[in-house]
Image (cartoon, rainbow, N blue to C red):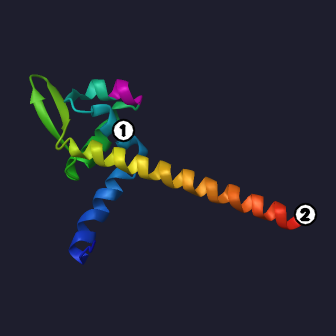
Amino acid sequence: MKFTDRDQERIAPALEALGEPARMRILCGLGLECRPVTDIIKATGLGQTNVSFHLRVLREAGFVRAERRGPFIYYCLIDSKLLRILHDLRNWLDARRIAAASVVKRDRKRSSAVRR
């Protein structure tokens, strides 16, 4: 797969926006439903100011949208595919962790055998 310079310039800011654990908690907490800020605060345990800051970053990055419903503002994922991408990334990282652990285990066995 080839990524042009333009592709890289588009992808890097998106990854930067996703690189904050609080933002990941917010995105996963939203799930497939639109939620008011008060629900996001309860679900994440973050303070109102912190949640508002991170929602602004996520909105500017194009991951969430805001909808006014009466006196409340609800936040929704712009595209539910993002959750699938995050799920796949987590699975890939888990597989890499397991593979790395097996290499370490194998290397320890080899070192132990050489010392004998």
Which label was assigned to residue 50? 1
Q: Which residue lies at the image location 19% right of the left edge and 30% below the top edge?
A: 34
Decide whether the magenta segment is chiefly helix, strand or loop.
Answer: helix
Amino acid type, mark 1: Asn
Q: Position of residue 102 (x, y in %)?
A: 62, 54
User: With 29 as the anchor, is 93 left or right in this view?
Assistant: right
Q: Where is residue 59 in the image (x, y as percent from the top left)?
A: 21, 46
- Nearer to the camera, 91 or 54: 91
SS state under label 2: loop
Query: Is tag 1's residue or tag 2's residue first in the polypeptide sequence?
Result: 1
Q: Which residue lies at the image location 32% right of the left edge and 43% below the top edge?
A: 54
Marks 1 and 2 in Cβ contact (< 8 Å)? no
Q: Which residue lies at the image location 13% right of the left edge and 23% below the top edge?
A: 71
Amino acid type, mark 2: Arg
Asked where in the image residue 78 lies, by quadrant, the reply is: top left
User: With 61 as the anchor, is 43 left or right in this view?
Assistant: right
Q: Can residue 20 be seen from the camera position used here?
A: no
Magenta residues, as a range?
41-45
Residue marked by disc 2: 116
Separation of residues labelled 1 and 2 (CA atoms): 56 Å
